[in-house]
Image: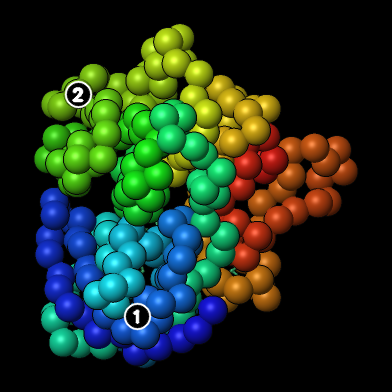
């Protein structure tokens, strides 16, 4: 983990409140694993805590990385008002990302993303496809209006879409898509990132799968294992005293491990 003032190369609005930001800097050479995140300082003196945002794409040849974020509060609002050429204080890459290099050509991976849990799946999907893995994406959004990156994911493999209001894909959520899919396909690996309810469903569908992974969200402060702001309890702990830190032991965990 290192820290650098990275340069904003471009900033583009993809959908209402959703922005894509491309950053350049030496730090990109450290960014190896999809699912890792950056801890970004908001350039406003009263906002002390850094904001964790997942790496969405890594381009080491160009020395650039891409993040996609939704404006939630003051911090992400400040990010959305920044322009190319401005600098962001970035710490990272942080956390443990997705394991994928054990998969072989023609094996099948389910890549599951919901809402703002979709961005880290882009780099993962590209790596899997490059390895010859057959990727089936399950992507859920609130509505057609807030969809982004459909074409980018479709370029990587089969995509099944859902929207909460039925304006695109099936009417419902990713869980509905998955319930159908598991009747016909037994995936060799499963990867999911999104709202807690969706992660719970994936956890219950694949509790003992040897290669099923969930990327968790948690409120964070230090981002590097020092403050315990991000702890989650373990499932196989009757005493309720054992916990993991999402920032440095995660954010990616195997299914069946963490209480969601
Ligand atoms: P704040 O003013 O801090 O909060 C606004 C609202 O958002 C509040 O209701 C608050 O409860 C809620 N909120 C803030 N942080 C979180 C959080 N970590 N989890 C759940 N709710 C939160 N967001 C993206 O848009 N794109 C990403 O790729 C992305 N990756 C993430 C990766 C990790 C490992 C984690 C932990 C979070 C990630 N997030 C991502 C969430 C992002 O960090 C928060 O949305 C952001 O910090 C909000 O900052 P803010 O100042 O705009 O809002
Ligand atoms: Fe400080 Fe995880 S955010 S320990």
Counting from the top left corner in percent of width and height, residue 185 is at 45, 16
Residue at image coords 52%, 61%? 219
The residue drawn where x is 20% and y is 56% is 18
Quarter, ligand 2: bottom right
Residue farthest to the top?
Answer: 183
Q: In the image, is residue 72 above or below residue 182? A: below
The answer to which of marks 2 and 1 sits earlier in the sequence is 1
The CA span between labels 2 and 1 is: 36 Å
* Residue 42 in sight from this viewpoint: yes
Mark carried by residue 42: 1
Is the CB–ligand 1 distance for label 2 below 8 Å?
A: no
Residue that protrudes farthest toward the right in the picture: 239
Residue 208, image x, y percentages:
67, 27
* Element under disc 2: loop
Residue corresponding to mark 2: 169
Residue drawn where x is 52% and y is 69% of the image: 94
Residue 116: assigned label: none
**Position of residue 97 measured from the top left corner of the image (x, y, whole percent):** 52, 56
Quadrant assignment for the N terminus: bottom right
Residue 23 visible at all:
no
Q: Give coordinates of residue 61: x percent, y percent.
A: 28, 73
Closer to the camera in the image, 74 or 34: 34
Q: Answer with left or right where residue 209 lies relative to residue 153.
A: right
User: Quadrant of the rendered structure where residue 11 is?
Assistant: bottom left
Q: Quadrant of residue 211?
A: top right
Between circles 2 and 1, the one closer to the viewer is 2
Asked whether mark 1 and ligand 1 are closer than 8 Å, the reply comes as yes
């Amino acid at each position: 983990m290192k820290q650098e003032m990275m340069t904003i190369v471009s900033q583009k609005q993809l959908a209402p409140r959703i922005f894509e930001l491309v950053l350049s800097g030496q730090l990109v050479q450290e960014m190896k694993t999809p699912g890792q995140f950056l801890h970004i300082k908001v350039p406003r003196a009263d906002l002390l805590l850094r904001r964790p945002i997942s790496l969405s794409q890594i381009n080491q040849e160009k020395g650039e990385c891409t993040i996609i974020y939704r404006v939630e509060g003051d911090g992400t609002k400040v990010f959305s008002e920044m322009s190319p050429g401005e600098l962001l204080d970035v710490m990272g890459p942080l956390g443990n990302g997705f394991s994928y290099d054990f998969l072989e050509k023609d094996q099948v991976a389910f890549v599951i993303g919901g809402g703002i849990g979709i961005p880290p799946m882009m780099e993962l999907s590209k790596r899997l496809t490059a390895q010859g893995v057959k990727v089936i994406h399950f992507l859920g959004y609130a509505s057609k209006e807030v969809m982004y990156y459909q074409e980018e994911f479709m370029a990587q493999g089969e995509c099944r879409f859902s929207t909460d209001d039925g304006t695109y894909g099936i009417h419902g959520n990713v869980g509905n898509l998955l319930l159908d899919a598991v009747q016909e396909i037994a995936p060799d690996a499963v990867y999911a990132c999104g709202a807690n309810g969706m992660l719970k469903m994936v956890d219950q569908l694949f509790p003992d799968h040897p290669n099923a992974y969930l990327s968790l969200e948690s409120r964070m402060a230090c981002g590097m294992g020092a403050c315990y702001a991000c702890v989650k309890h373990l499932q196989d702990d009757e005493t309720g005293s054992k916990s993991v830190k999402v920032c440095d032991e995660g954010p990616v965990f195997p299914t069946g491990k963490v209480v969601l």
